[in-house]
Image (cartoon, helix red, strand yellow):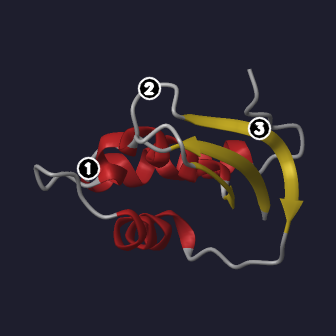
Amino acid sequence: MRYVRVEVDREDSLTKISNLVLPWEVPVLQAMYPPGAVRVVNDADGYAERTVDGAEGEYKRLLERYGDDDNGVSFVARAFGAGHIGVQALAKMMQETQAPAAGLLS
């Protein structure tokens, strides 16, 4: 699996978090934070052996990891859509971002 390094500026503007995530986690993080707070700083930062349990299993994992906003809407649904539409959108991004030439930096 290919990972990307992201930086997240926390709301207090004094805290910056740097972390490796799977490429399809970036839109979820962007749904969690204000516009511009999440940046991909290296789109080929790491590779690791990891098994992903298909798009449906990954959607569920992301739901558990990132949770809901204050209105009870999951950040995953905000990023990809809810139900089978969200799973399909996630599956498409998973396929696109794991291709060898895929890039996330603009």
Q: Position of residue 27 (x, y in %)?
A: 50, 41
Secondary structure category for the residue under label 2: loop
Residue at figure coordinates x 77%, y 38% from the top left: 41
Mark nearer the viewer, 3 or 1: 3
Query: Which residue is labeled 2 in the image?
Result: 35
Q: Quadrant of the N terminus?
A: bottom right
Amino acid type at mark 3: Val
Q: Secondary structure at mark 3?
A: strand
The residues tagged by marks 3 and 1 sit, at their Cα atoms, a distance apart of 28 Å
Q: Earlier in the sequence, mark 1 or mark 2?
A: 2
- Gap between marks 1 and 2 measured at Cα: 21 Å
- Residue at 75% of width from left, 50% of height from top? 4
Which amino acid does the dot numbered 2 rest on? Answer: Pro
Q: Which residue is mark 1?
A: 82
Q: Which residue is mark 3?
A: 41
Q: Give whichever of discs 3 and 2 has the lower sequence position.
A: 2
The numbered dot on residue 12 is none
Residue 51 picture location, percent across and down: 69, 79
**Residue type of the residue flagged with mark 1:** Ala
Residue sitting nearer the eye, 104 or 32? 32
